[in-house]
Image (spheres, helix red, strand yellow):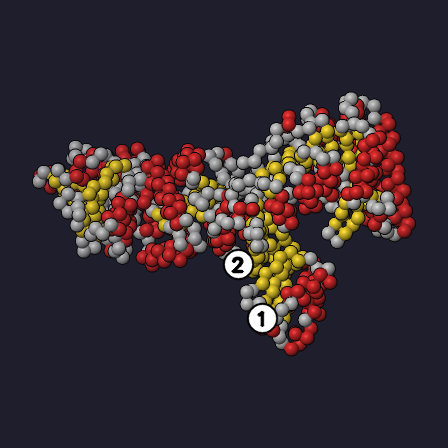
Amino acid sequence: MTQPVATDSITAAAHKFGGSSLADAACIRHVATLMRERSERTQVVVVSAMRGVTDGLLALAAAAAARTEWRPQWQALRERHLQAADGLLDDPTALRDWLATGFDELARLLDAIGVLGGASGEIRDAISGMGEVWSAHLIHAHLGAMSADYALLDAREVLVVRHEELGAAVDWAATTALLDAWRRRHVQDRVIVTGYIARDANARATVLGRNGSDYSGAIFAALWKTQQLHIWTDVDGVLSADPRVEPEAVMLSALSYEEACELAYFGAKVIHPQTMAPAIAAGLPIFIRNTFKPGHPGTRIDARGDADGPVKGITLAGDLALVNVAGTGMIGVPGTAERVFAALRAAQVSVVMIAQSSSEHSISCVVRAAQADAARAAVEGAFARELASGRISGVAIETGIAVLAAVGDHMAGTPGVAARLLDALARVNINIRAIAQGGNERNISLAVSAADATLALRAAHAAFWLSRQTLCVGLIGPGKVGAALLDQIAAATSRLRRDANLDLRLRAILSTQHLLTDERDLGSNWRDRDASFVGGDLDLFVEHLRAAHLPHAAILDCSGSDAVAENYPKWLAAGIHVITPNKQAGAGPLPRYRAIRDACARGNSIFRYEATVGAGLPVITTLRDLLDTGDELHAVEGIFSGTLAWLFNRYDGTQAFSALIRQAHALGYTEPDPRDDLSGTDVARKLVILAREAGRETSLDDVVVENLVPSSLHGAGKDEFMARLGELDAPIAARFAHANAHGKVLRYVARLDRDGVARVGLVELERTHAFANIRLTDNIVQFTTRRYCDNPLVIQGPGAGPEVTAAGVFADLLRVAATLGARL
């Protein structure tokens, strides 16, 4: 990483301060202190007008020309400068009088413009440059009051320019002569200089153009032969993208001159392009610094740049149009491209980007949208005969175009940069209208629809600056399991970023009542965030998730809702990964299950559901591993209900079965309505999930289920059912007595045999059976396979509870991330 030259080794430096750095008296005092505390002997300080003043002056001139009221705005501008003087000096009388004289002169010019009904260019330049003169006097007066010996240079005294097609060009010989004479009259080592303004060869006042103060800074840095130029702004330095468009934009420590020029051309607020010319000629390093964070090193721009990454910046240029000239008559005809661009030049149309097919059948170029009609007319005029004869089929204009540019010196010689950029746009379905790359490989430019521009920039930026294992995460159902999952993710986030380069971004949480979103990451304090009252709005939830620029998106569905599961095929087909403990999808209607599988293939997405069977136990993963490695499944048996496991582990005939149910209900082991557990339906769903994982097209209706609830209680209300629980006692007591008489135990078991027959119900097992000796609420599953035939493979452990279920979902999320990483 390139580091700034140590301050104590610098004897001469130039500094340019923008309007935001000089916004008011407090800012001006801060700048003065900052300059006084620097150690360089020779110091050139170039200043802009106070923030917004140049625009205000031009607005006054326009109002006067339109003969509309301008005096209130003039008075407000005058008062602002007088208040600044009051805030900078103990006795501002002389400075106030000087400022008042300047504003009186401005008023006379505005009156004259009103009489004439317009202003000449010279008058407009004189008015627009007044702000720099005023701000220079303000800071100079304050420094003088602090006993700091600074000279004051009005750039119109020495800086001679001529206006050419490419902008203001310095007459270096004339300027140097005038400056030498000025310096003989002013012996101070430190000087305040007005930015933006200059003079022409006839000594008439002129300006350098928009953002010309940066150019002034470079010019005077070169004239004084300083060792550095510091451009002071209100940002820390140059970012990899516009932070208003890309919130993930990062600070760049260094750029080369060429990189900065490319970024500036395409609209990045790096530095005015003209500033580069004097700096390059003098080999002058430029630092983009934050006035209000002077300790921050900022971004260094010099001949070398640094070696960090192939791409330094992603920029967008908007308000463009695509001009396409096509026809078979162009193929192999020399000079066609020259005629196209000569016609555009004659019409004074600026070309932003050029692309030509290798067949020479078409030439495309991007122009400013405001010049699109002029471009078409110019080209149609130049090729009138060819259009009439059909050798050129037409000149087409497509408006609503933006150009995305990726810039970096080290793209040259780095394979795969263009592929990564194009892949990033393909992932978010961005269509590229034209593409251009210079021979130096420093810039790849893509024309895209303006409607897609923001998404295109974010996707491209993510491809080069974010971990390829960055996941945008949205959670549905922040109940007990969902909340535990979010807490587990928050606790692991830092470690995963550090150790696994895995960046999980929680961007949305949806409950039945609220939607909580964040552009970047809700973080661990999501419970304290304000939410929108749009609960259950799945479309809005997914829209926010999919609007992200992140490489991948995953939905964690902890809702248990069949209505939510109905959306899985749509989400998976759109490329959103789905991870869930919700059994409704895996055990739901077979057509929907098939649709989910088909959607995964079409969307190149992943559906994970380990926690649907056994919570955090690796049941499905183990079955999948057995089958994927060529084993053959003979049977699956298991106890999949912690509630029923507890009941039959505890039941020994000494107390009524109904009493145990009431106890389990009080302890929270059962569902609010215990029939949901006693019916066996939940266990049957888990068996269906395993059967389908084993390749069987099993439906819930195919499972033979023993319902422990007597048929007389199926239709009763919950309260009535609880009151009549005793009706379960006699049947269960009889089953227990029979088992006990034969030295066996009762367990509620799910079984899938080799022929695909699925059964769920109460069975008698030997006391030595693995299922007879589990802990109270454990789940257990036994796989009998070709390899594990004599000694089945057994998995046992807690199969319910928010923490272990959340851990199962989290493990699936990490498996998805690992799979995505392996695809890269």
- Residue drawn at x 58%, y 39% is 254
Few, some or many C-alpha atoms within 10 Å of disc 1 (few <14, some 14-19, many ≥20)?
some
Q: Position of residue 263 (x, y in %)?
A: 62, 47
Residue 173 versus residue 248: which sits nearer the camera?
A: 173
Provide the residue designation for mark 2. Answer: 431
- Residue drawn at x 88%, y 35% is 101
Name the image quarter holding residue 36: top right
Name the image quarter holding residue 139: top right
Q: Which amino acid, mark 2?
A: Asn
| Residue 791 as seen in the image, left or right of residue 824 | left
Distance between the Cα atoms at labels 2 and 1?
26 Å
Q: Position of residue 646 (x, y in %)?
A: 24, 36
Is residue 656 in view? no
Q: Which disc is residue 626 wearing?
A: none
Mark before the other along the chain sequence, 2 or 1: 1
Provide the residue designation for mark 1. Answer: 331
Residue 823 versus residue 276: which sits nearer the camera?
A: 276
Q: Which amino acid, mark 1?
A: Ile
| Residue 184 as seen in the image, left or right of residue 255 | right
Q: Position of residue 747 (x, y in %)?
A: 18, 41
Task: Give the SS element for disc 1.
Answer: loop
Q: Position of residue 746 (x, y in %)?
A: 16, 40
- Residue drawn at x 65%, y 31% is 292
